[in-house]
Amino acid sequence: MSYPAYHSFCIEGGGPANSLKLERQRVKHHLLLLLLLLALSRSRLQSSSCCGAVCIHAASLPCAEPARPPWLPRWDTCSKLETPACGMARLSRPAALLLSALICFSCAAADKKKKKLYIGALFPMSGGWPGGQACLPATQMALQLVNKRTDILPDYELELIHYDSMCDPGEATKLLYDLLYTEPIKVVLMPGCSSVSTLVAEAARMWNLIVLSYGSSSPALSNRQRFPTFFRTHPSATLHNPTRVQLFQKWKWTKIATIQQTTEVFTSTLDDLEERTKEAGIDISVRQSFLTDPAVAVKNLKRQDARIIVGLFYETEARKVFCEVYKEKLYGKKYVWFLIGWYADNWFKIKDPSINCTLEQMSEAVEGHVTTEIVMLNPETVRGASKLTSQEFLTQLMSKLGGKNPEETGGFQEAPLAYDAVWALALALNKTVGPLKARGYRLEDFNYNNRDITSEIYRAMNTSSFEGVSGHVVFDAQGSRMAWTLIEQLQGGSYKKIGYYDSTKGNLSWYGNDKWIGQGPPADQTVVIEEFRYLSQSLFVSMSVFAVVGILLGIVCLTFNIYNSRVRYIQNSQPYLNNMTAVGCMMALAAVFPLGIDGLHVHRRHFPVVCQFRLWLIGLGFSLAYGSMFTKIWWVHTVFTKKDEKKEKRKHLDSWKLYATVGVLLSVDVLLLMIWQIVDPLHITVEKFTREAPKEDLDVLIQPLLEHCSSEKMTTWLGEWIFSKAPHTFLSALIEENSQYSWVVYGHKGLLLLLGIFLAYETKSISTEKINDHRAVGMAIYNVAVLCLITAPVTMILSSQQDASFAFASLAIIFSVYITLVVLFIPKMRRLITRGEWQSDAQETVKSGSSTNNHDEEKSRQLERENQELEKIIQEVKTFFFFQSACFRARPCQSIAPGREGGEGRPSRNYGRKQNCNCLRKKGLFGM
């Protein structure tokens, strides 16, 4: 029997299975196919070649492995029918077509039996973060591929029910109610932005629902006590903070500022950042927040000199912030902004009616800012669970978006996370099928009261680990995704990758292509350069020259006084006291040098020694110079202003008493200085002045500093010692060194000076051979006092101006010393030179030796006695003439004898004179 020609015909076709519950048709279809195969097995089978045969390949049927019913033979090759599991049957064309139709119908029936599992999702298509614009298409792509897979949930189909939450918790509350109380039952909830996820995750535990978010970064969602069933493929925002801290340390910033939108996600992120920066020794000096209008917060950042600013806000608020940033000029080479990296790449170019800044202004304000974002697209060419590489995924997503510009599509960067979220859910649900079956459950048995199924899904999600298009997907104990951080910088209007950071290993991969508007990374604050104010060297040299000349003058005066100490005129001026005055003046002049020495000349650790030199030189110089002059004035006043009976006792001058007086004054000063330096020694203190801006356009400020000598209880010491000398010009330098104490307490030295002025005034008209220069001493005291009254207050006012203060103090010392030396010594030199007294006295001294002093003293006492006798005679003569005039006016004492000696009744001259003398004798007034 011949058969018609055979034709090779391979059946292909089918499509996506329709999941209809047709359990009752399953047995019927199997029986029909079994009968057909039995009938065909009796037909004539030929073993010829495949040419002309109708070949039915089971592998090409739509119900491919493993969805092929187990009872269906597997047809592999066009050879012979070896076994029911592997072979080929040659059939006539009608029989083959009938068999193929029955097989395809059986496969379609097998597909229609899939049960649906529903996912309730909230995609923000608008609002603060319109991430649903790209995340929704990515989710639909993933669902389509999952439902086609026969190795993942073969008996189930995932279906998405979604709404637009607008990233608004209030709107999300209404939509969540609809999802929960409207059929069908949802197995899992998938919210988007953090504020909505917080609401959904907190409520989901009451319905035993697993929550899987694709776009939530709030650190608060890592709280397992509050959100026990929450997972997310978007890493926590705190994952940015280790990267930020690493960058702060790389660029050596220790002071930052923050500005945040007042939402829980940003508040919790900032709290975590504050803890991390504190551990790293970085200070958050300024922390600003706003709800809707950032104008005031940006102004506060400007006022508080914020330089390194971390901004935490949504994309729409970011445009508002940087419009205000442009207005406040809070951008440029002095500032660096750190933003969140999940904004659209052209977020600052999008027209926003809520701001009044142009595109050029916004582009200028955002230039150079740095973003940190989670690595959301696998940089490696790896085919993961979805059998797609990351680039293939992007290609399909772009096709799904219909060629829409990714930069203008919200959530484009987060789309891989949404895609992997569906795969994480599908793999977890697939993993629960076996354990649930062992416990007598099925996924379709899920309801809001069944905790056992929820526990199995939670366990499967918690152990998820697979390669996705966003990288390796794994969750930590808090349900957050672990990932790398990408660091980008806006350069020329586009974002450039400048590095990666692996927070799990603390490894920073740096490209080195970061660019800055200035020469490099700006300072974290205005750079304050500490600059010590030093004394003008020309001024110091000038004053030093005057001081040296004064010291030379003092040496000349001292030498002159010592050389001529045996000259009587010099001896009567108490030369030893004058020697002390000269030595004190030279010590005061020597203090000019340490007064001008500052940190420019000596190291700071040696500066207290300079302070000691200042104190001791001026103190001892004052005691010697003023003490010797005060002693002279005091002795003159004591001797010549007392009663006559006491004058005789004190006319003899003991020189040792004068020296003892000076010694007491000097000892008191030495004792006070020693106690001061032992109990409370001087040390260096630094005075800070108002910061100054340099003339150049530099991001620096100059902090002027000035060194002073001080001690812990300076007020007490100054009141007892230094300010006691404040009226004296020698000590105006010390007043300058301690002028921060605005009050002046006069101590015993001030009283001595005032007393010396008074004594000099009282003795200005006294002349004595014992101290023949006391008037010159008084004049020196007057001049010094006048200089002091002018210099001391001025020096105190100018204490913060080192040049002016040093000039006044030094000139006061120099003029005081010059006046003292000139007034005391120059007249002596002039007299000895012009009159030649030093020659005659010197010759007499050679001849008579030491007897000169005794002879002069005896001669002086004899002259005083003669002066007293002459004073008595003069007094008697004055008395005689007074009473003589009284006798001539008394008529009864006169008698006239006419005709005698005078002739013709006129009295003679002798007679009248005799009568007047008799009159005086009778009155006992004249003894002649």
Image (cartoon, rainbow, N blue to C red):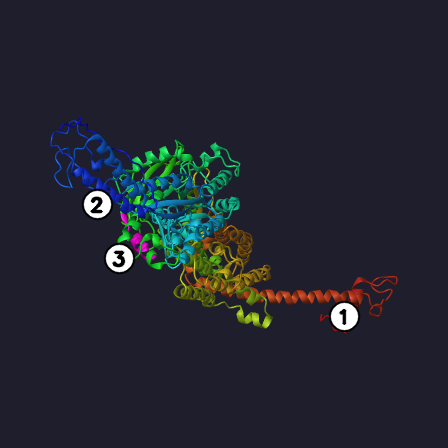
Q: To which residue does mark 3 refer? A: 438
Please provide the residue range marked out in magenta: 454-465
Check disc 2 and give the amino acid type. Pro
- What label does residue 70 carry, if any? 2
Most extreme residue toward the top, as rendered? 5
Nearest to the observer: residue 717 or residue 255: 255
Q: Position of residue 465 (x, y in %)?
A: 27, 49
Q: Is mark 3 on a helix, strand or loop?
A: helix
Q: To which residue does mark 1 refer? A: 920
Check disc 3 and give the amino acid type. Ala
- Please rate how many residues cluster around mark 3, counting C-alpha atoms within 10 Å: few if below 14, some from 14 to 19, many from 20: few
Check disc 1 and give the amino acid type. Leu
Residue 220 belongs to the span the image colors magenta: no
Q: Image height check: is 686 above or below 82?
A: below
- Identify the mark nearer the N-term, 1 or 3: 3
Tell me what residue is drawn at x 57 percent, y 62 percent.
Answer: 759
Q: How many labels does the image show?
A: 3
Q: How far apart are marks 2 and 3 (CA)?
A: 22 Å
Most extreme residue toward the right, as rendered? 904
